[in-house]
Image: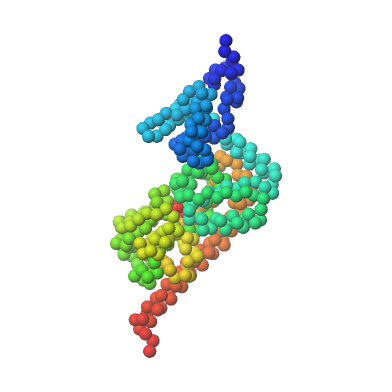
């Protein structure tokens, strides 16, 4: 007769899964379902693909049913896989909350802070984290930088404690959102561009300009394309690139113009290499938001960082104003020079 304590799940033994399933397997299962791929899960967890497959085979044996099915080129959890995944999520969330409560008992002397940011915030977040880390040197900080779509995935998967995100239209009620610093988008050209010294240029004047845009999934890309679409103008997209820094180099290389966050140009605002074009409707007014999931407890460390970030907002806002004013000053100088050329002083 079979020993009931060692029958597979679904039998009568209640501790079978406790003895045969590991937390690591649950984490792998959760990651595969979230990313829809064994390969991507292996990459994210720094495991080899055979390890991931083997662990899922063991989990399926313990559960006594296949966990995944292949549909065309995608994999999906089976009904049993969905049940297991729901359990994974609740177990992993409890453990993560436990970790937070235990860290809170130790106060701010040590702990972990995981921050996920949108690429445009790269120009602000490291400075903020640096200042925070000088005040609380015992805290381990990790920073993840991605575009809007990938950051939304991280938020849905509770990968980080806090997020700096762009516009918040689609994220639903499961998050708390605190409006943060301004993130205006400006139209940027190389400083010798013929439109660089012009005033109040209509958007239609850009219809024939080669435009460089960010990759699909980027919030900046969508904002700029929407701006053109609203005006009924079809932009001439010359190329798409995956980062603001590469776009800046492409502009300097004479490949085209682009809309970028003012933050990405702060260090170059008085250098004279870039010009902000005075296009109707620009700067496009956007702002960042501090976002966290309601279903996950905010650790003492994360709460303290949130307050720290909010307190730093006026300084970040002042940097934006200063950068725009510096660009304006360069434009004015350029205008004065060209007027002098046209009417040289006697
Ligand atoms: P992203 O940033 O283009 O990297 O998605 C969007 C934003 O700053 O709102």
Instruction: Name which residue lies at 36% across and 69% down.
Output: 193
Task: Please say whether residue 89 is visible from this viewpoint.
Answer: no
> Which residue is most to the top?
1
Rendered-image quadrant of the N terminus: top right
Left or right for 115, reference 338: right
Task: Please say whether residue 129 is visible from this viewpoint.
Answer: yes
Toward the viewer: 282 or 98?
98
Coloring scheme used: rainbow
Rendered-image quadrant of the C terminus: bottom left
Q: In the rendered image, which quarter is residue 296 located in?
A: top right
Toward the viewer: 136 or 97?
136
Instruction: Name which residue lies at 40% across and 79% down.
Output: 337
| Residue 268 image position (x, y, % from top left) | 48, 66
| Residue 311 image position (x, y, % from top left) | 60, 57
Number of marks present in the image shown: 0
In the displayed structure, would residue 108 be above or below residue 56? below
Instruction: Name which residue lies at 54% across and 32% down.
Output: 25
| Residue 312 image position (x, y, % from top left) | 59, 58
| Residue 265 image position (x, y, % from top left) | 47, 63
Toward the viewer: 282 or 302?
302
Instruction: Name which residue lies at 51% across and 44% down.
Output: 155
Toward the viewer: 142 or 277?
142
In the displayed structure, would residue 334 be above or below residue 101? below
> Which residue is most to the bottom?
346
């Amino acid at each position: 007769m079979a020993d009931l304590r060692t029958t597979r799940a679904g039998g009568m033994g209640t501790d079978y899964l406790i003895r045969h399933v590991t937390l690591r397997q649950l984490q792998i299962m959760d990651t595969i379902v979230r990313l829809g791929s064994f390969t991507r899960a292996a990459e994210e967890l720094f495991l080899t693909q055979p390890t991931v497959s083997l662990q899922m085979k063991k989990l399926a044996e313990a559960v006594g049913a296949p966990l995944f099915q292949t549909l065309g080129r995608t994999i999906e959890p089976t009904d049993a896989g969905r049940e297991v995944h729901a359990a994974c999520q609740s177990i992993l969330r409890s453990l993560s909350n436990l970790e937070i409560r235990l860290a809170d008992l130790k106060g701010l002397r040590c702990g972990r802070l995981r921050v996920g940011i949108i690429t445009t915030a790269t120009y602000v977040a490291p400075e903020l984290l640096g200042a925070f880390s000088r005040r609380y040197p015992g805290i381990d900080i990790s920073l993840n930088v991605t575009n809007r779509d990938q950051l939304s995935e991280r938020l849905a998967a509770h990968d980080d404690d806090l997020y700096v995100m762009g516009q918040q239209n689609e994220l639903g009620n499961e998050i708390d959102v605190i409006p943060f610093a301004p993130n205006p988008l400006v139209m940027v050209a190389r400083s010798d561009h013929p439109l660089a010294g012009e005033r109040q240029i209509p958007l239609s004047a850009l219809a024939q300009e080669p435009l460089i845009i960010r990759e699909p999934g980027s919030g900046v890309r969508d904002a700029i394309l929407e701006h053109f679409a609203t005006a009924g103008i079809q932009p001439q997209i010359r190329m798409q690139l995956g980062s603001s820094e590469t776009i800046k180099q492409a502009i300097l290389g004479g490949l085209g113009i682009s809309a970028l966050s003012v933050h990405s140009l702060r260090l170059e605002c008085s250098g004279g290499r870039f010009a902000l074009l005075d296009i109707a409707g620009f700067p496009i007014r956007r702002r960042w938001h501090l976002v966290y999931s309601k279903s996950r407890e905010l650790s003492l460390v994360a709460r303290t960082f949130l307050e720290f970030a909010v307190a730093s907002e006026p300084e970040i806002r002042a940097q934006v104003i200063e950068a725009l004013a510096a660009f304006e000053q360069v434009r004015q100088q350029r205008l004065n020079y060209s007027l002098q050329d046209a009417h040289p002083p006697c």
